[in-house]
Structure formats: C-alpha cells, structure tokens
Amino acid sequence: MAFITPDFTAAAVALSALSIVSLVALRGWRDWIQLKREELAAGHLPLAQDAAVPHAGSRIEIADLKERLRKLEAIAAGVDL
C-alpha cells in the first residue's frame, strides 16, 4: 500500500493552486487582449481627448522649440547667454 507523505501532499496542493491561478490569469489576459482588439476594430480610443487641448508631449516640444529659437535669436544678436 502506497503511503503519501505530507511533503508530497503539500507539493500537489501548491501545484494545483499555481495551475488554477495561472489559468485564471491567462483567461483574464485573453479577455483583455480581445477587448483591445474590439476597441481598435471599432475605431475608439480608450481615453478620448478634446481636440482643442494639445497633447502634453506636443506642448513640451513646442516649449523646447521656443527655447531653441530664443537662443538662436540671442546668438544672432550677439548676446551671451
């Protein structure tokens, strides 16, 4: 008659729990990917932006260009910065 040790039982329970958690996580991941595919297919952005408000990245780029322009104008005028 086979004797099951407590170590084997604990390992089997841990492996079963890990398998269940992995399967649930995989299901959630697949559902999330499907949601994103449907959003792309519908042409909707997840966070709609107002067209009048520029994107933060473009505002930073504009500020950087203005700073470069100011420096070039100072160089052209012969002013040391």
Image (cartoon, rainbow, N blue to C red):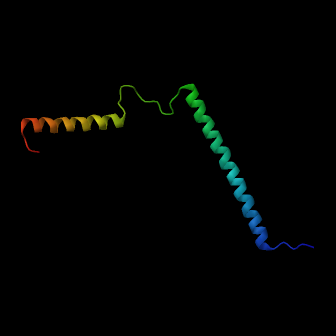
Residue 61: quarter of image: top left
**Residue in the picture at 78% in, 70% down:** 8
* Relative depth, front residue between 42 and 52: 42
**Residue in the picture at 57% in, 25% down:** 42
Name above or below for residue 58 compared with residue 13: above
Question: In what quadrant of the picture does the N terminus appear?
Answer: bottom right
Question: In what quadrant of the picture does the C terminus appear?
Answer: top left
**Residue at the right extreme?**
1
* Relative depth, front residue between 9 and 81: 81
**Residue in the picture at 81% in, 74% down:** 5
Q: Is residue 81 left or right of residue 53?
A: left
* Relative depth, front residue between 21 and 64: 64
**Residue at the left extreme?**
78
* Relative depth, front residue between 68 and 12: 68
**Residue in the picture at 53% in, 26% down:** 43
Q: Position of residue 56 (x, y in %)?
A: 35, 36
Q: Position of residue 57 (x, y in %)?
A: 35, 37
How many marks do you count on the picture?
0
Q: Position of residue 60 (x, y in %)?
A: 30, 38
Q: Is residue 38 left or right of residue 73?
A: right
Q: Is residue 35 left or right of residue 69?
A: right
Residue 67: quarter of image: top left
Q: Position of residue 64 (x, y in %)?
A: 25, 38
